[in-house]
Image: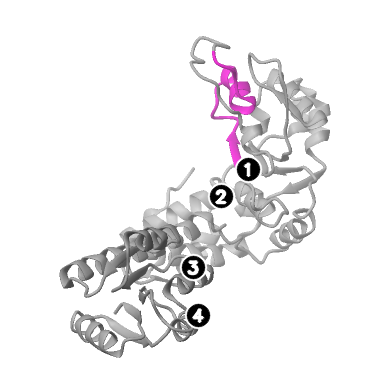
Amino acid sequence: MSNILIIDDERAIRKTLGEILSYEGYKIEEASDGEEGLKKFRERTFDVVLCDIKMPKLDGLEFLDKAREANPDVPIIMISGHGTIETAVEAVKKGAFDYISKPPDLNRLLITLRNAMDKTSLVTETRVLKRKVSKVQEMIGDSPAIQRIKDTIEKVAPTDARVLITGENGVGKELVARWLHEKSNRSSGQLVEVNCAAIPGELIESELFGHEKGSFTSAIKQRIGKFEQASGGTLFLDEIGDMSLTAQAKVLRALQEGKITRVGGEKEISVDVRVIAATNKDLLKEVEEKNFRLDLYHRLSVILIHVPSLNERRDDIVLLVDKFLENICAEYGIAKKDIDKAALEALKQYNWTGNIRELRNVVERLVILSGKVIQREDVLNNIVQRS
């Protein structure tokens, strides 16, 4: 049931509006002047406010100013029997959702309220979605290796030190990068991600540094590169071991000087970026084979964080499975499924070459194909065995 606050110094108006809106299914709270209304507004949660303009102690426009300071998301509908077009315009400029003259037309009032409710719902949904999108996944695990990573993140994140994250595919290197950004002093800025392995060699420089219009055949307009986009925040270079030597040289210069030049451009552009890199390769071996620059390796590896494979932290599988079951069942809108000890033991004994990513896929498969309780037979029947 939606809550509506009616603020009006005329008791008859409050009573009439209250009876009409209560009949329509709304929960009503009343206030006899602006001061009382503001006190209730600050103490409780309302979906919409109906507020008179001409009132003693604190008039409607003053209430509007103070209420929007306290909570700008609540729609406030102004009502008045002495209003003019200028008053209505002023109210809307100050942030009122709408303006209705007294005596209010019932149909218009109800339509305006419905529209205001829709706005409240959209604001709430948007806030929830933003939390879901921006929320960094929890780092699951109690193993000594994971505890060391968490401790390192706590110490390193507040600094601007560059970090090189190593580990196999699917172990969660991106999650480590996200936590480093989230706990840093740059968390209000962007975390810009670049998968160096997914971008063709001839396009990586344009992706990182941008390009000027006409700098090459398909450059039909100017492009801002990832370094500029991440300025003031963090740039995450995933799979940096796959970057070309030419691009490596430019990245090295950007790290040394804090400046970049767009492809086809001449102007130097200053960038304030913290770089976090990740790779599944042995970069020192790549250096020996002339595939990676040693000076860039030293620039990137001020702090080294190695993320262990799932096979190296089998004791964490129980916690991971429990979390995956909770999340996946919630996504499918079903009650969380249980898993018996024998099934968990089977999962712990499996050779997880795809690491956490593979484990999550297997748990999702089990949620879909198993009964209320996941049994050992379910695991054996639905896991991909390798020779």
Distance from the alpha carbon under mark 4 to that under mark 2: 50 Å
> Is 291 placed left or right of 371 in the picture?
right
Element assignment for label 3: helix
Check disc 1 and report the residue beneath it: 168
- Residue type indicated by callout 3: Arg
Q: Is residue 379 visible?
A: no
Distance from the alpha carbon under mark 1 to that under mark 3: 51 Å
Upstream in sequence: badge 2 or badge 3: 3
Percent position of residue 185, x then y = 73, 54
The dot on residue 68 is 3
Percent position of residue 112, x then y = 25, 65
Upstream in sequence: badge 3 or badge 4: 4
Upstream in sequence: badge 4 or badge 1: 4
Judge by depth and name the residue closer to the eye, 152 or 108: 108
Q: How many labels does the image show?
A: 4
* In the image, residue 387 above or below residue 217: below
Q: Which quarter shows the N terminus?
A: bottom left
Residues under numbered marks 2 and 3 in contact, where contact means CB atoms less than 8 Å apart: no
Element assignment for label 2: helix
Percent position of residue 300, x then y = 78, 37
Check disc 4 and report the residue beneath it: 42
Element assignment for label 4: helix
Range shown magenta: 191-213
x 47%, y 62%: residue: 324
- Residue type indicated by callout 2: Asn
Check disc 2 and report the residue beneath it: 355
Percent position of residue 348, x then y = 55, 61
Element assignment for label 1: loop
- Residue type indicated by callout 1: Glu
Residues under numbered marks 4 and 1 in contact, where contact means CB atoms less than 8 Å apart: no
Distance from the alpha carbon under mark 2 to that under mark 3: 49 Å
